[in-house]
Amino acid sequence: MRKMKLIFLLPVLAFMACSEDPITDQVETEKQPQTANFTDEITEIAFPEEYGKVSEVYYTGMKLPVENVNGKFIYQGDIIIPNDKASKSPVKLVYEKGETPQEKSVGRTSHYWTDNTVYYEIDGSLPNKDRVYDAISHWEANTNLEFVKRSGQSNYIYFTPGSGCSSYVGMVGGKQNITLADACSTGNTIHEIGHAVGLWHEQSRVDRDNHITIHWNNIKSGREYNFQTYQEGGYDGDEFTTNLDFGSIMMYSPYAFSSNGQPTITKKDGSTYSVQRSALSSGDIEGANSMYPSSSGTTEQSYINGEYYTINGVTVLRYYDLWWYRTTYGWKKVELIDGTWYWA
Ligand SMILES: [Zn+2]
């Protein structure tokens, strides 16, 4: 990709004879190289035709490699990281008592929607609005979530046309776009809503190397960072389900970001697997419902000693009926006060 990039840049360089380091600083996006003409029809991507400069930002308690395309930080193809909540340096997740929490302090999923209710609006110019209505009906029929047309609420999803399919993860605050190009299907829309309610990608689970092999040689040059695990990003908690779910609608296709039509992801035995973009899997539903438990039950959630939980964005361990957070120096006791974690 580097070589192609230079060829592509030659006419630009001629005009920029005296400028400094135009490759890294001045050119943020460019057309995809001609050799990489293999297209994976399944895996969602925000800007299919463009590449950006890759850098690392801190977000949701993790250090994530992101691609800067059109001024947006893109993570793993279709996840948009909000610029105002990303940081070049680590952010705090747990505070001293009396300290005022920073706006940027969030956990792996920044915020869940409150009262199991997601507000939304649809851009009048979005073609085929039925894919949105169908995807919403599917989410409502299978989970505890309810989607309500916005009537003045400040936090909401805005379904709008874009060059690809993309979404933010969790409720990021304010108006948050889900972009849908014409090619994005109802299934892709279910996937993007999955991000917006707090789901990440299945193939980047912390335990994914027990289940799949990543074939780095087949990945398009410049797209390798999309295959980082959440553990590499600094997240060490448990996942919602016990095994990698090949049936998850949040799972990449075996050919995601392939440069040559050969698989980039296989099972451990080298075989490929089928992915689907038609429905939430039972694992997806389990994950969504553990983020958004049914409100009908009056019983308070009971926590199991020895289990990890992600609560208000921070992954904590329940042990001896207390909460523990892992720091570089070991486990420290924490407590949740009015939605913010403090050292106990
Ligand atoms: Zn995605």
Image: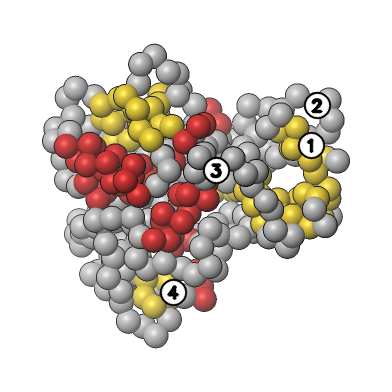
Distance from label 1 to label 4 (Cα)?
38 Å
Residue reaching furthest to the left: 128
Image position of 89 (left or right of 49): right
Q: Which residue is mark 4?
A: 212
Q: Residue at x 64, y 47 (%)?
A: 301
- Indicate the position of residue 285 as horizontal and vertical percent values: 41, 54
Instruction: Give the amino acid at mark 2.
Output: Glu
Distance from label 1 to label 2 (Cα)?
9 Å
Image position of 319 (left or right of 291): right
- Of labels 3 and 1, earlier in sequence is 3
Instruction: Give the amino acid at mark 3.
Output: Gly
Q: Which residue is mark 1?
A: 342
Q: Which residue is mark 3?
A: 297
Q: Residue at x 52, y 50 (%)?
A: 290
Q: Of the residues tagged 1 and 4, which is closer to the observer?
A: 1
Distance from label 4 to label 3 (Cα)?
38 Å
Label 2 secondary element: loop
- Indicate the position of residue 61 as horizontal and vertical percent values: 63, 45
Q: Of the residues tagged 1 and 2, which is closer to the observer?
A: 1
Q: Which residue is mark 2?
A: 99
